[in-house]
Image (cartoon, helix red, strand yellow):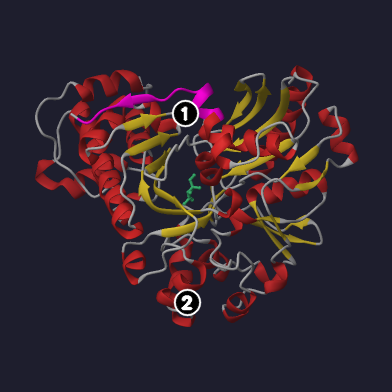
Amino acid sequence: MTVRSVAAVDLGATSGRVMIGRIGDGRLDLELVSRFPNGPVEREDGLHWDFGALYEHVVEGLAEAVRREPGIESIGIDSWAVDYGLLNDGALLAEPFHYRDDRTVRGVDEVHAIAPFAELYQRNGLQFLPFNTLYQYRVDTRLADANTALLIPDLIAFLLTGTAVAERTNASTTGLLGVESGEWDTELADRLGIPSGILPPLVDPGATIGMLRADLAERIGKDLPVIAVGSHDTASAVVAAPLSTPHSAYISCGTWGLVGVELTDPVLTDAAREANFTHELGVDSRYRFLHNVTGLWLLSETVRAWEAEDGSSIDLPELLAAASAVDADVPLFDANDASLAAPGDMPARIAALLGADAPSTRPAFARSIVESIATAFADAVQTASDLSGRELDSIHLVGGGSLNRLLCQATADRTGLPVLAGPVEATALGNVLVQARALGAAPSTLEELRALVAATHEPERFDPR
Ligand code: LRH
């Protein structure tokens, strides 16, 4: 077997990256080609994606990837869920909004007045998140001028190939996909005043979306197919979470901590709805039965505020080492409190939740954040187990959070379960694996793909103390 290579575009909250993935001869690895900013930008009407700049970075990164590795065979794109761009006759109508913009509050009330949450849950299986795409559509004044709506990875694929599709794992986060049918719920869309005609044809991960447009093939240096991957970053991350038994939970931890188990059948019970557990579609028709916990966002926003206050940068490993050395018990707050969702002024908002108990030193404050996140993780792991009837014996913690040893140990301690940390790049690896499988360069079942991840990226184990 020879080594084959693909390009993975991963658009995360801290940055966007283009990477080369190589697979074969017992190898599965990544080479970072380019990294570029992908934070929200404040415009007159709210928070947006800096989409024009982002698209240029993606194309430049792909060209550099092909220069470095002329053997690249395909491109796959993933990003966070729910956000979209509207098109009219192929032209983008406006810069996409960022889901942390608070304009959707009105959308929630209007949608629930037409279709109460309990009905929505039976239809789409989603936990309530105020930014789910259907609430965003409902308040988008440009919807009336659009004839196509594309989630961000699909939008980039469209700009690269000219073909408009909706990749199914990400489509399942819109709220307009039937949880059991896996098809657009056009009746719901029409009832909500969202013209179902704007929803493009669905495709599954592994499908070829199209070949690069001629001008882009020239600019990138090669005529390549764009292959649909689990274009929802969490779907890709869970592909590469090396779950070895059904008794493993996962936590995909970056800005968010997505905590749950993988199921083959949905659990659409009142209890699951009340616990706000979601059913996002995964690769190979699995369900990610999980709950969103606010993750490293709390820490990164806190550090960002302290850096602004100091006018200099903070060394995160040093801060975490000092936080680990704090002996006294730290106070806890609800990591999922709605007041912590928007950007800006995080230390003050956390301090408001902690009241008089708020730690006065930065290490103790950081420790409070990490322990509060771990506590919310432990609650969600227990709830996932109770609701699914699965006994759990281990937790795979993947993504950026797997580098945070304090968080991994705190999660082990607070769940009483061993935490197997890594891979840190689970999302990009999942993106690569699904492309490679479509090219015939990787095994066919999810279990085999995960075995390959386990063999090439040995996790670090944290036992509960
Ligand atoms: C993680 C994620 C998560 C969504 C949120 C919007 O990056 O995709 O799965 O709930 O961002």
* Location of residue 390 with respect to 72 vertically, above or below: below
Measuring from the top left, give residue 277's x and y in whole percent: 38, 59
Front-most of residues 116 and 267:
267
Q: Is the residue indicated by label 2 positioned so its CB lies within 8 Å of ligand 1?
A: no
Measuring from the top left, give residue 48's x and y in whole percent: 56, 50
Which residue corresponds to the image point at 35% horizontal and 19% vertical from the top-left? 315
Front-most of residues 297 and 305:
297
Q: Which residues are magenta?
A: 452-464
Measuring from the top left, give residue 39's x and y in whole percent: 52, 39
Q: Using residue 288 as the reference point, say whether residue 302 is left or right of it.
A: left
* Location of residue 416 with respect to 385 vertically, above or below: above
Which residue corresponds to the image point at 22% horizontal and 25% vertical from the top-left? 323
* Crowd around label 2: few <14 · some 14–19 · many ≥20 (10 Å): some
Mark 1 or mark 2, which is nearer to you?
Answer: 1
The quadrant in which residue 245 appears is top left
Asked if residue 363 lies in the magenta stretch, the reply is no
Measuring from the top left, give residue 309's x and y in whole percent: 32, 30
Q: Which mark is residue 251?
A: none
**Which amino acid type corresponds to the residue marked 2 in the rendered image?**
Glu
Q: Which residue is mark 1?
A: 424
Q: CA distance from mark 1 to mark 2?
A: 39 Å
> In what quadrant of the picture does the N terminus appear?
top right
Q: Which mark is residue 110?
A: 2
